[in-house]
Amino acid sequence: MVAGQEDFTLDTAADLAGRERDGNEVRGRSPWALAWRRLRRNYVALASLGVFLLVVVCCLLAPVYANHVAHRGPNDTNLTGSIEVNGKSVPVISNGGATVLPDGTVVVVPAGQPIGPQWGAAGGQYVLGADQLGRDLAVRLLYGGRNSLRIGLTAAAISTIISVLLALLAAYFGGAVDWILSRVFDLIWAFPVILLGIALGTALSINGFHHAGINLAAGDLWIPTAVIAFVFIPYIARPLRGQVLALREKEFVEAATAQGAGPIRIMLTELLPNVASTVLVLFTLIVANAILTEVGLSFLGAGVQPPNASWGTLISDGQAWLSTDPWFSILPGIFIAVTVLSLNIFGDGLRDALDPRAKVRIEH
Amino acid sequence: MVAFLIRRVVGMVLVLIAVSFITYLIFIKIPGGDPAQRLAGRTATHANIESIRIKLGLNHPFIVQWFDMVKSLLSGTLVSYFNGGTNVVDQIKQGLPATFSLCLGAGIIWLFFGILVGVISAASAGRFSDRAITALALIGISLPVVWLGLVLRYLFAEGGWISSFPDGGYYPFTQNPWEWATHLILPWITLAVLFIGFYGRVLRSNILDTINEDFVRTAKAKGLSPRRIMTKHVLRASLIPIVTLFGLDFAAVLGGGAIITETVYSLQGVGYYAYQSIQAQDLPALMGVTLYGAAFIVVFSVLVDIAYAYLDPRIRLT
């Protein structure tokens, strides 16, 4: 062999082309690395992820706030107590009465009206006011956020895992398996999301769940979690099944079969990686939808049960004081809107980054 | 086409039977324990519980109970557990005018503005107005409906800003159309915002996909004006998925999906009845409403399929 004349391959060609340009070697990048590079340039999406993580961290710090700032737990009632505001003693739950302001207007406060936002005037107590039982609203807002986020994230995770498994099974095996699973999806899909959630949530909140060796008390947070996870299954499984059906006919699956790969290996190492990007995007958007569903269910009394707080129950509690203390129900709503919006923006950005031509949508 | 219709209608009946069975399962089997004992209260005697059990037919096997329930629902004699056993079917019927008024108005608003938003942002794709509209649409689908309803109520009905609208309640159209409309404007907007955002987004991406199709290039090559291409060719093709979406979403809100809006504004519709039933843990009533809602969705999805098969003959084969 003549010196300097090695085997010339396609890799060598890429190598030479890379050196030719500016002396740097061309690096091969995986699709995930390319997606990350696209996502990194999408500042809006990254900022939304930051906002979402900030909300999560704030809610996780709820016990710290309760112990060191508010000095009051989320379920500590205070019906008869009073707090010091600017040197004056003010009852947390008003006894009712009227005050005349210097300009002559009369402010009538009905009995039982909880104290409004103090914004720090009471030394960290009742920063956002109290609820009808004298519980500190700011503390409940953080604990409620913890519950709402926990329910949203776990429900979306459970729903996604189950749907991915079912979609893989249905599309890989086809035939009777596919027919049965598709009819199950159709059935769940035939109910309006909120009505099925209400039906299950109410039925489960009576006695809890005591079947198949699982025992959940009526007020358990796992009940709304399971209900929400269940109602969203067809919304993930149906689009995924379609994708896997198309992938199943591709040559690489045939190649894997020819190499002797069994059904489980084909499903997990050939099909799953190919739908992973869709799953990731769907998961992000389902988290946002699950949080909204939790809010709706809890507002209607079919989600998180008292005394546990969630953003939905807080809005519901505050409804009665809408005209006198609007912050009560408006603040939890702002938290929800910011969280859901940041998740939606990030989900959109993620979709654009992973597959600029993909069409992943959540229909509700 | 006839075979397609028959297949779809038979499928629909089967789904409805399955749905009623599942609903019954949810409400009778999941809570566990003895429904009769739950109804009788804590201090009930044994004879008391037994009489309730016989009165509600809870002593029969499950299949018979389910069959009786379907029979009483179809013949309009299903009674609720509480309030002295009011007739569930009558209560649902009483709620229909309010629910239909809410959904019809909101449906018109969201379809009109959804299409408007989608067309404007697709026509100005990439420009500032497109970005602004897209951002607004995203905010629209991220707002919790409950919260939007309460904020609108606070701002426009309870004096937060102006109090020119009545604060909740339903006013029959036949008594006073003006009062009917003013009572419904805020609920209409509350219900429509989510869908406007959603439809705008879907339509925008549909239009942007359609613009690259061959028939649009042909239309351009023929020398048609951009306005004519947009309305006659692009929009027509892009609107088909919107027809499907609208059919299903409209069925869902009619079938109780508007429950949150109705509850926030105390509109005495079907959803409000469901809300009251949740508070009372009145299972037959909830069962009635759930079945009513599912029936709407199933029937409408068949109607949408038929409309689709009419619009696109390729579908009839599958």
Image: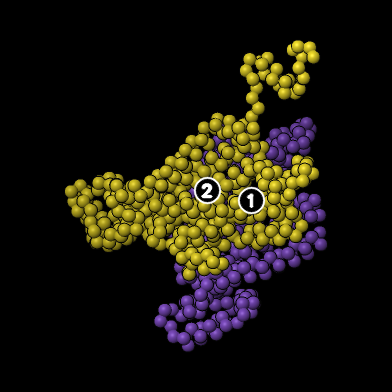
Chain colours: A yellow, B purple
Residue A153, percent across and down?
A: 51, 50
Q: Is residue B13 visible?
A: yes
Residue A164: mark in rendering: 1
What residue sits 63% from the left and 53% below the top?
A163
Residue B52: mark in rendering: none
Residue B293 or A135: which is nearer the viewer? A135
Q: In this figure, which residue is indicated by the disc labeled 2?
A: A288
Q: Amino acid at mark 2?
A: Ala
- Figure label count: 2
Give the image quarter of residue A187. bottom right
Residue B164, percent across and down?
A: 42, 53
Q: Which quadrant of the figure contains the N terminus of chain A?
A: top right
For marks 2 and 1, the one nearer the N-term is 1
Q: Amino acid at mark 1?
A: Val
Residue A148, percent across and down?
A: 46, 52
Q: Secondary structure at mark 2?
A: helix
Q: Is residue B164 visible?
A: no
Give the image quarter of residue A90. bottom left
